[in-house]
Amino acid sequence: MTARDLSALKTDPAPLHPQALAARLAAEPARPLPRLDALLAEAPDLAALAPARGLLSRVAEGSPFLWGLIERDPARAARLLSDDPDAALGDVLARLAAASREGDRAKLASVLRRGRAEAALLVALADLGGVWDAFQATAALSAFADAAIRAATRFALREAHDAGRLRLPDPADPEAGSGFFVLGMGKLGAGELNYSSDVDLVCFYDGQTAPVADPAESTAAFVRVTQTLTKLLQERTAEGYVARVDLRLRPDPGATPVALSRDAAMIYYETVGQNWERAAMIKARVVAGDVTAGEAFLSELRPFIWRRSLDHAAISDIHAMKRQIHAHKGHGEIAVAGHNLKLGRGGIREIEFFVQTQQLVAGGRDPALRVRKTVEGLNHLVEAGWITAQARDELTEAYAFLRGAEHRLQMRNDEQTHSLPESAEEMEAFARFAGFDGAGTFGEALTRRLRLVQAHYAHLFEDAPPLAAEVGNLVFTGEQDDPETLKTIAALGYREPSSVSAMVRGWHHGRYASMRTARARELLTELGPALLAAFAGSGRPDEALFAFDKVLERTQAGVALLALIRANPQILALLADVLGAAPRLGETLARRPRVLDALLDPAFFGHLPDRREIEERVAHALGDARSYEDTLDRARIVGQELNTLIALRIASGTAETAEAGAAFARIADVLVTALFEAVTAELRAAHGEVPGGAAAVVALGKLGGEEMTAASDLDLILLYEHPDDVQESDGRRPIAPSQYYARLTQRLVSALSAPTSEGVLYEADVRLRPSGRAGPLATRLRAFETYQAEEAETWEHMALTRARVIAGPKAFRRRVGRALGAVLQARRDPAKVAKDVAAMRALLDREKGAGGVWNLKHAPGGVVDVEFVVQALQLAYAAARPEILHTSVLPALSRLKQAELLPADDFEPLEAAAKLQLDLTQAIRLAVGKTFAPQDAPAGLKQLLARTANAPDFKVLEAELSDVQKAARAAFRRVIARLKAEAGKAA
């Protein structure tokens, strides 16, 4: 690098200081120091520089790293103190350039490391001695880094040429025409490198022009070049190292090679590039390689960086990142001891963000703002009228002060640290090394500037919305895990912090279609802390977050979902509760993310939908169907949405569990009705109608009793009737009425249960029809009435106590309803009913009664005991007291009590058992499906069950459940015993 190149990196346009460094140090006070005296006694050249003694004593006390460099080569130190610093740096850069022209890797590595040591000492002495200001020091550090990177790149390219992997146009000038270029990012790109900084590099190649021997191996060839230049820079040898290299600012570093084709990079930036990457590219500069190719790439990238129509939403994205960093310990407030000069309040990053964010807003319309340097950016912001001259002057002075303090921190041990010492003793020593009288003086100077910077920064973002949750340091840029981020994630309670970090990083990199818009990632950055905090409180944070990951992977509506969460924080709490407590529901959301549209319903947090609202939703969904198959798909979509709405409300506690059964049943009623009409129309198109015929769908079981759960099947039977003289349907392909209605039943079952591209709506079961599987699929009403009167067993009549007619022509539905009523109101012997019910319950006890208290349906005292009591009493007494008939258990219990057929001593334990176990069944079915094993249940699910039962914890709930079941079994036995005592009596 030439003197002209060095001057180009300077922020201050004034001439460089021509004086020798030693001549500037006469005012530096010297302190007695034995080890300095010993060194000077052995190094006459150094001892001759009497004015430098004060500076040397400060170095000896304050910087082990610099003192080590001086002790190892006192003559070099004397030369640097005597020579003009600009000339001395120029000599170092010239030696690097010369060594890069040779083909000796070991020699180049040695020259690079010796050059780095000399440059580090030179910059430190010039900085500490006041010969260079902070900006000249950063320019010199950047100049050395540029020269070292260029030397390593030249060598790596020539080595690839010699090995036959590249065919360079001019091996003597390997960079020219190579198609390979290295971008310096961050402070290196801006020419503002700090003393012990990493160098952020991104390596690209032009696949169209690169002189690769085998074009199919282009990536491999340039990955090898990148690895070589990286090793030359950061490998530690006995002579030290040159620079730590960070390659993680390339596009999607977790999934891309270290050298990337410029075409692939352009596609990435144009499709999924993030706002932080736009901000990073402001400072991007070609530091090595094919400058022509690199400049062409940056020119083509300008529309990505500088958007003429940018809105301020992008700024919230960057600001949210800054606030997340602030939430880390030591960054939350202005301090001195332990304060982070870079990331802390009022620190260096705030000044840089202050400039960059305004550049992003206005740079698309004002090319003058497209500059890399921070101070230069402040100047242009004044000229453009964005900030005042006073703000520029104050921030420029503060920036110089903070960068100077940062340099002195890093000079002490050549560490990339930004945090001031914690202890008072260390703070005192550092203040003296930094040139202050003591910690008090330094602290006052620092605090004044931090507050000033914070005030300017806060003014810029005074309208920014607060983060939903500031939980700690959360940074997801680059390829590697941020150590402080892992600590934050672990502290939140996640078992696998690294997996969580990688997952969230993938969201930010747009690996899912839902996250490939700038707005989606802006929202994600803002909501990230709140998301992690919410799922951390779910009881099973890793599983809940992984379930949310599946939702993001499979949905297309990333922006809509995240915007919904941002506008309605309660939805985030709901999702966390659901995904943490209900694995089955979480899988449903992941498998069918479209059901999340249910959350967009304005009435979601209001009442559960009534019949009219459901009918309107279903009619709207099916109304635009283009075909019968489309009708089935649309029915599944709307059904999933509606059922998920209910399930989410129950899981989140925003609706009573007791309301769920009827709500699920209303949805099924409407969908069965709609599909029955659809299949009837399809059958009519093929076979016409049965003249004078009609059919109705009867629901039994959970649907009939309006006690459906999220996992319930549909128990259905189809009854029909037609005139005796009608022998066939009247369509183009006539068929017999029995065949006609059997096909109608088959089509209805298929419409409900057949898997389509949108899944299955319900499993439909028609085995409760007369004669079961052996009988016809559809039953003629007259035959049904005869069968029930002459052949049906008690258990079949028990099933009919839950029968409801849910679909079909209104007049025929009424006729079927009267037929069902006649069956239930037939006179029966209470003792026979009791005997049959007791026998059936004993059989179920033997076959299905095991499994403990959580076998809620069949355990002794479970739901079946309550249902059998209701059904036994209804069959025994409905002939005389028809008002006791009701298809739902709890209303039927109440009617039996009012009719004085169920004493309070029996009613109360039975009602308690029904309420508790039906509620728990609802929660379990929406959470895990059919079965529940307490030993395997996640903590979130146990919390959900305890909340459902209004119990303080799961242990108390189990004890309460056991007591309730024992009381219900005792009541069941008393009721059956009383019925048996009614021997010989008619109801």
Image: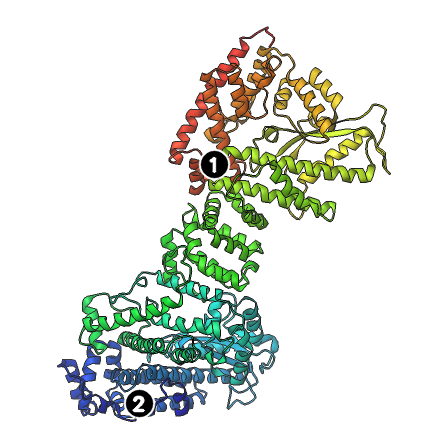
- Residue 867 as seen in the image, left or right of residue 329: right
Instruction: Return the mark for residue 933.
Output: 1
Mark 1 to mark 2 CA distance (whole Å): 76 Å
Q: Which residue is mark 2?
A: 85
Nearer the viewer's eye, disc 1 or disc 2? 2
Q: Residues within 10 Å of mark 2 (few under 14, many from 20)?
A: many
Instruction: Return the mark for residue 279.
Output: none
Question: Viewer-proximal residue, 217 or 625?
Answer: 625
Mark before the other along the chain sequence, 1 or 2: 2
Q: Amino acid at mark 2?
A: Pro
In the rendered image, the quadrant that contains the C terminus is top right
Q: Which quarter of the picture shows residue 459?
A: bottom left
Q: Mark 2: which secondary structure?
A: helix
Q: Residues within 10 Å of mark 1 (few under 14, many from 20)?
A: few
Question: Viewer-proximal residue, 597 or 243?
Answer: 597
- Residue 629 as seen in the image, left or right of residue 705: right
Q: Position of residue 157 (x, y in %)?
A: 50, 83
Q: Position of residue 78 (x, y in %)?
A: 24, 90
Q: Position of residue 183 (x, y in %)?
A: 47, 78
Question: Viewer-proximal residue, 78 or 982?
Answer: 982
Q: Amino acid at mark 1?
A: Ala
- Vertical comparison of 852 with 118: above or below: above
- Vertical comparison of 787 with 924: above or below: above
Q: Mark 1: which secondary structure?
A: loop
Inspect this view and state whether residue 506 appears: no
Image marks 1 and 2: residues in contact by CB distance under 8 Å: no
